[in-house]
Image (cartoon, coloured by chain):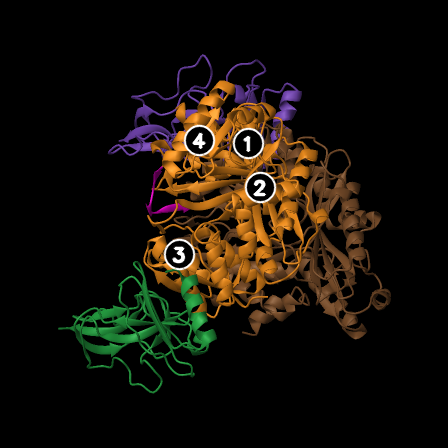
Chain colours: A orange, B green, C brown, D purple
């Protein structure tokens, strides 16, 4: 096992990793930017090294400084957390080349699943369901129409070289598709210098369904079942829950096992998440694989009893996964609420500044992962999440009730947070009945 | 120039016993020198400001480094003596006072410096970076020891500005 | 189910019951003394009624005022919490007579188990192990000596009518016993007007082992396994853990089942605790039965997944126990630390006053039950417990590590708390190796 | 005298259609009267100060009571008008302004009171307790309504002391 682990991150996830290290008998070392000097989580580290000024690009994204900090602190491994350098295969490679174990997948496995074309190819091999559609670019429009008829409308036309919404068209029927392909080709040619487009199934009222998987360096991998993260705004997850409500148990087992098989095929070690969309008939279509621990990992910990962060460190140190798939059972229901310093009443305006009041909820089934305390100043430089409230209860109904209680107890001020939004969403019929989809939050917000 | 490329260059040098490498293209410029014996680093100059100068020597950084425990701004306690300015570390690494084990310190108390005077080396990732005074004046205090680990923003020297 | 429950208590247990009510869809009503006006837990109640001035005898112990508050708030049941009126059979009777369900046992069952002679008789019938000894008073000293020889020295001589340590003598051998009986008789005669004494087995290096049991009104009862509360000072529990460490599984099952049988025999509904001493050979001797929910109930909740407070309310409303004994399984290890506002460095001097700093620990496996927040003023009128830290982890070793981390994160000031004492005890070899006993804390404190 | 005993006495009276009960011993004294029709309470006097006077009538307290939501001290907002004193509730219960439904209020604005003037009744556990002004002066405001639930310390009347 490692003696000292450097944590290349900040805030709540740095604190989460500190706690995991401490319990494994590892000394956690933090790096921090000068904006985070005095950050409460740093007190809990064995050592803290300032690596640069506030902007991430000059501190938390500076590979050379992070490696230098690992050198001077004599760490033997580096944990990237999430965001920042966590999905940067180059960083993983530099860590390895500099003699530090990267706590995450090998650069090769990260690349294999991070590249969408390669990932889709692997997924098909592993039996992981992907979006049907033309695989490569469209040469012949009639052929594209035939594919669309086979998979059923609506479909989406996407530019092969594209991104950012350009070169994309949603088609509801054949006429729309023919027109859409023409337009998308022109747009893609102009925008990316590459007119190649392809056609995939389009889902508009889907739910976001993601499978937590974890593998070791010995070819073992298990899934820890799934999370439903359909409560989103601008692709930012707000509420996550595990397990996904009202899902057919046999379909759940099948898609979760296919996700575990995918990371086995990729020779992947560490935690990963396979993200899917689930349509109303509970068909699954993989979106992408996140090759790191995720913000919402605690709800999977709650329902399975597995400590994902500790396991990630242990497999990075070469240990075998300490459990088999048959050891993993779903117990109860869990929800996570991302407490963001944003004002939901004023278009989610960010709320950096002094936190004067921070009264956290407690009691049975309540977990709070947060680096914040009264007197903490939220810096303007990083994301607005100031904590995660994780609620675990025997059933989904009880979890909603317990969550409403905890949110009512949770007092933060004078900065505004997303707490009132969650109090509203937990009373929305669509959410309560699990008939929601990835757009319901935006529809609700637009309607008011 | 990314770290991977630099590290590959240094590895190339070590593997082939090169002592100097000088690269230029329209965006980047790098000069790397190394010694093949276990001696101290030798200073190099860099051309384009954004490209750090580097020097590689097979010195174990962890063997020489002491663990930094001080917080920036709290590292000396003397940084705000009236009229004095501090030269702060622009990076994380190990402080070397001299450019070689047999060499005298680059900066001692009483030395007059100007903006371009190299006052120490900071080593990270086996690369030695020269640190300039960035101001004119006289060194009145050296705040860190040879071989000590320093973090970003840590005060290294106190200077009485001229 | 009840519509509105009045909580005849304060502080953390009032908050615990509020949370349970809320999740059951019940409106919680609080009573409070004027010393507790503005108490943070009152904000979470549906209604709060001031019932009197600060002294408990004029407020939390005033049956008439509590009943009056139940009347004006139209509650349909009363929860006594712990301490105060919780083990007062008269109060239970007044509640019933006034038309309010008492959330706890019937007055008859409370009396049956609360009376020590009656309880011991029932225990023998149920197969619950009790202290061997003379059952009634001693007439003949030679006979007492023979009993002592049969059960083995040391023995304790106790006055039948006694209490408060008077009329008690510990005897290590026959001579000591003969002398002790004489002295105890004289003392008892003088003190209680009744010279009758009896002899029981005496344990000095025992561990405190208590079994959590819960019954319904339909004759069902289960145990939720045990807690070890050997870390005590002046009979006040400091650290509790569940399950008891290093106990033979077969012996555990047997004593726990005997405790469940005892409350079945007593036709007891609600939560109760059978307290035992356990000697070094893991023999068990019942001390008494507590006929209420206990301070340390959360660690049993942690290892069994059962919500004891909610279950207590449900059985009081007439529901059947929602689980059978075979549903109850021990999962992991849990510890509770009573955070008392006392200064362990100054002979545990009470520390009432303003809490300026209150930074609670968090993360996986951490539960905090507390009514305190920064800005709260601890009143001088009630007990010094300001919160309970409950830590759950897969093993005892991991639980100790996790607890050390949580205690290091927990910052309270300027008032002193027992946190530093626990940081010390968790590193004590006797505790770590589970070779401790009910006197080890006092021995350690005396030695320093 | 504990509640159980009192309740037993009241039950005895109801069960046996008694209308008055007067008990005295060296520690305690109680006078209980009841009416057998569904009318309002009738006031009684108590002897020993620590023993409350009681009156039982089969009036449903919950039907008449309004739920108290105000906090003591915040219940009127008028308690600290200059020179005024408040008569506060010494118990929890339901406020009755008069000693019977057909009777006039015991205290109205303008009434001169002394320490022994009974200003209202408070009912709890089917027992009616008479509340005295405990001071001399003039009632200037009645802060609660007939049938309203009150808590300990709640302000009932404002009095201008004489």
Foreground: A392 or B50?
B50
Pinpoint residue D161: horizontal percent, then vertical percent.
28, 32
Front position among marks 3 and 4: 4
3 and 2 marks in contact (CB < 8 Å) = no
Mark earlier in primary sequence (3, 4): 3
Are dots 3 and 2 on a single chain? yes
State whether residue C406 appears in this view. no
Which marked residue is nearer to the observer: mark 4 or mark 1?
Answer: 4
Crowdedness near tag 2: few (<14), some (14–19) or many (≥20) residues, C-alpha within 10 Å: many
Main secondary structure type of the part rendered in magenta? strand
Q: Position of residue A238 (x, y in %)?
A: 47, 37
Dots 2 and 4: beta carbons under 8 Å? Answer: no
Q: Nearer the viewer, mark 2 or mark 1?
A: 2
Q: Chain of mark 1?
A: A
Q: Are marks 3 and 1 on the same chain?
A: yes
Q: Nearer the viewer, residue A157 or A437?
A: A157
Provide the residue span drawn in magenta: A349-359
State which chain disc 4 sits on: A
- Where disc 4 sits, the SS reads loop
Q: State the CA–CA distance, disc 3 to disc 2.
A: 31 Å
| Residue C114 visible in image | yes
Q: Answer with the quarter of the image where residue A209 lies.
A: top right
The mark that comes first in sequence, 3 or 1, is: 3
Q: Residues within 10 Å of mark 1 (few under 14, many from 20)?
A: many
Q: Which mark is residue A168?
A: 4
Q: Label 1: which residue?
A: A207
Sequence-first disc among 2 and 1: 2
The residue located at (63%, 66%) in the rendering is C431
> Residue A120, which numbered label?
2
C-alpha separation, residue under disc 3 versus residue under disc 1: 33 Å
Q: Name the residue tied to disc 3.
A: A60
Helix, strand or loop under label 3: loop
């Amino acid at each position: 096992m490692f003696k000292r682990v450097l944590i290349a991150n900040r805030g709540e996830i740095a604190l989460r990793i500190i706690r995991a290290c401490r319990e494994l008998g590892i000394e956690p070392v933090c790096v921090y930017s000068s904006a985070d000097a005095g950050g409460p989580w740093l007190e809990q580290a064995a050592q803290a090294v300032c690596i640069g000024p506030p902007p991430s690009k000059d501190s938390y994204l500076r590979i050379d400084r992070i490696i230098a900090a690992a050198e001077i602190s004599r760490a033997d491994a580096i944990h990237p957390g999430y965001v920042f350098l966590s999905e940067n295969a180059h960083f993983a490679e530099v860590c390895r080349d500099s003699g530090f174990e990267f706590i995450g997948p090998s650069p090769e496995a990260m690349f294999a699943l991070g590249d969408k074309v390669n990932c889709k190819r692997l997924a098909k091999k592993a039996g992981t369901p992907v979006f049907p559609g033309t695989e490569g670019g469209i040469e012949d429009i009639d052929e594209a129409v035939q594919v669309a008829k086979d998979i059923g409308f609506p479909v989406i036309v996407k530019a092969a070289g594209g991104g950012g919404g350009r070169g994309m068209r949603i088609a509801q029927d054949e006429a729309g598709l023919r027109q859409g392909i023409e337009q998308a080709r022109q747009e893609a040619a102009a925008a990316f210098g590459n007119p190649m487009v392809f056609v995939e199934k389009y889902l508009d009222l889907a739910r976001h369904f993601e499978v937590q998987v974890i593998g070791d360096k010995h070819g073992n991998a298990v899934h820890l079942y799934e999370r439903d993260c359909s409560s989103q705004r601008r692709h930012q997850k707000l509420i996550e829950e595990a397990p996904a409500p009202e899902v057919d148990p046999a379909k759940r087992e099948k898609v979760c096992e296919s996700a575990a098989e995918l990371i086995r095929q990729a020779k992947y070690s560490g935690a990963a998440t396979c993200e899917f969309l689930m349509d109303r008939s509970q068909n699954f279509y993989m979106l992408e694989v996140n090759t790191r621990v995720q913000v919402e990992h605690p709800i999977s910990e709650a329902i399975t009893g597995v400590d994902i962060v500790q396991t990630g460190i242990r497999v990075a140190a070469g240990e075998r996964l300490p459990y088999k798939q048959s050891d993993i059972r779903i117990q109860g229901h869990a929800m996570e609420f991302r407490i963001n310093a944003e004002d939901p009443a004023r278009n989610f305006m960010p709320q950096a500044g002094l936190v004067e009041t921070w009264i956290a909820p407690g009691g049975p089934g309540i977990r709070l992962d947060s680096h914040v305390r009264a007197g903490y100043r939220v810096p303007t430089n990083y994301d607005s999440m100031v904590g995660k409230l994780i609620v675990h209860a025997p059933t989904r109904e009880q979890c909603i009730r317990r969550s409403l209680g905890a949110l009512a107890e949770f007092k933060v001020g004078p900065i505004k947070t997303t707490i009132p939004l969650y109090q509203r969403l937990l009373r929305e019929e669509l959410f309560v009945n699990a008939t929601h989809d990835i757009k319901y939050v935006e529809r609700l917000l637009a309607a008011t | 120039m990314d770290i991977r490329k630099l590290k590959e260059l240094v590895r190339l040098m070590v593997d082939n016993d090169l002592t100097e490498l000088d690269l230029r293209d329209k965006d980047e410029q790098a000069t790397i020198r190394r010694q093949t014996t276990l001696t101290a680093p030798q200073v190099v100059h860099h051309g384009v400001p954004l490209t750090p100068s580097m020097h590689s020597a097979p010195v174990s950084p962890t063997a020489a480094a002491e663990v930094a425990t001080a917080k920036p701004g709290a590292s000396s306690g003397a940084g705000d003596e009236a009229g004095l300015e501090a030269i702060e570390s622009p990076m994380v690494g190990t402080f070397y006072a001299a450019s070689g084990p047999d060499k005298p310190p680059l900066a001692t108390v009483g030395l007059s410096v100007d903006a371009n005077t190299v006052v120490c080396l900071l080593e990270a990732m086996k690369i030695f970076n020269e640190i300039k005074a960035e101001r004119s004046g006289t060194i009145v205090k050296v705040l860190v020891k040879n071989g000590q680990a320093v973090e970003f923003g840590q005060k290294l020297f106190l200077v009485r500005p001229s």
